[in-house]
Amino acid sequence: MKINKSLIEYKIREERRLSFEEGLFLFQQPDLIWLGKLADRVKRRIHPEPIATYIIDRNINYTNICVAQCDFCAFYEKVGSGKGYVLKKEVIGQKIQETLRLGGRQILMQGGLNPALKIDFYEDLFRYIKTNFPTVRIHSLSPPEIQYISRISRLSLKDTLIRLKAAGLDSIPGGGAEILVDDVRQKLNANKTTSDQWLEVMETAHKMGMKTTATMMFGHIETYEHRLEHILKIRDLQDHTMGFTAFIPWTFQPDNTSLGGEKTSAFDYLKTLAVSRLMLDNVPNIQVSWVTMGAKIAQMGLYFGGNDFGSVMIEENVVAAAGAHFRMSQEEIERIIRIAGFEPHQRDMEYKLLEHREH
């Protein structure tokens, strides 16, 4: 059967899964409003209440020393660089204390692949956090970090995750995915995990009962086909584990990077957001990216398949190093959500709605 708009509309109406070819048809459509309406229909079916969620957390970059030296990263420093750092756990504790004071309940710790930091560093750090801040959720360490810790600590991936979880790791962010196509990863000089290794970390974590998120960094050297291949790899793993709580597509920020290039347009961002919602029929939440696109485009994203406004993000350094300096307070996020016609509601990493708490 020939792919056309009527066929796509029929399959969406009947809640039937879209194929790779149908996803490519969606990406090739110039009619952004049609795409947005379809994605909004699916979102409202999954989330019928007029709510847009958000979370208060802090992105603590515990080290900037990294052996991967990816071309798209403006944050890392080489081993031996005078600008390299590893945060002391007492400094991290101060940041957590401030996060709690501002109403946060979670920290997102990510850093470089630092050869000096083996698993005992993370066990000691996580135990320190859980001892001193027992209510804080540790949503930390991307798959490349976990895979690297496993390798330099000479442990299996499963044993590494068992030990990290026992020390206090609660869930895993989806960083380091970029595009889950190895040809693209090699051209990006992403010297860390292969696509299969990234997926293996997530699958292993899911089978241990840990929830994770998934991301996609797009708008650099990849094609629509590559984006779809990435999305379908997430969908396939989710079929087996149901461990992903959300998908977060965000745009490559070229400033100060070796890769360089132009910033992705709002048109392409909203199209990709909508296609993500339409293709990922088994991932419950799609997050908009105000950090890279700004408040207004993120606000529009709530009508292009997005149901979550992401994080207040008290601190963020990696994307900022590449030229994205958007900042929003909790009050601003709630105002933007209300203007868009939704009720803002704070949630946790597993998308449970939280009671409002004065702070």
Image: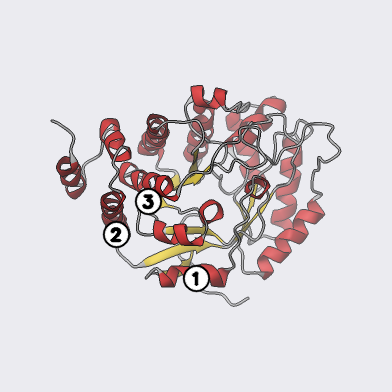
Crowding around mark 1 (Cα neighbors within 10 Å: few <14, some 14 to 19, many 20+) is many
**Element type at marker 1?**
helix
Residue 308, percent across and down? 44, 58
Crowding around mark 2 (Cα neighbors within 10 Å: few <14, some 14 to 19, many 20+) is some
Residue that mark 2 sits on: 44
Residue 25, percent across and down? 27, 36
Q: Given the current orientation, which residue lies at the most extreme front position?
A: 262
> Mark 2 or mark 3, which has the lower sequence index?
2
Residue that mark 1 sits on: 334
When asked about the image quadrant of residue 28, the answer is top left
The answer for how far apart the CA atoms under marks 2 and 3 are is: 11 Å
Residue 120, percent across and down? 75, 38
Crowding around mark 3 (Cα neighbors within 10 Å: few <14, some 14 to 19, many 20+) is some
Residue 190 is left or right of residue 273, and the answer is right
**Element type at marker 2?**
helix
266 or 288, nearer to the observer: 266
When asked about the image quadrant of residue 256, the answer is top right
- Tag of residue 284: 3
Residue at horizontal 25%, vertical 38%?
A: 18
**Element type at marker 3?**
loop
72 or 212, nearer to the observer: 72
Residue 114, percent across and down? 74, 34
Looking at the image, residue 303 lies above or below residue 188: below
2 vs 3, front mark: 2
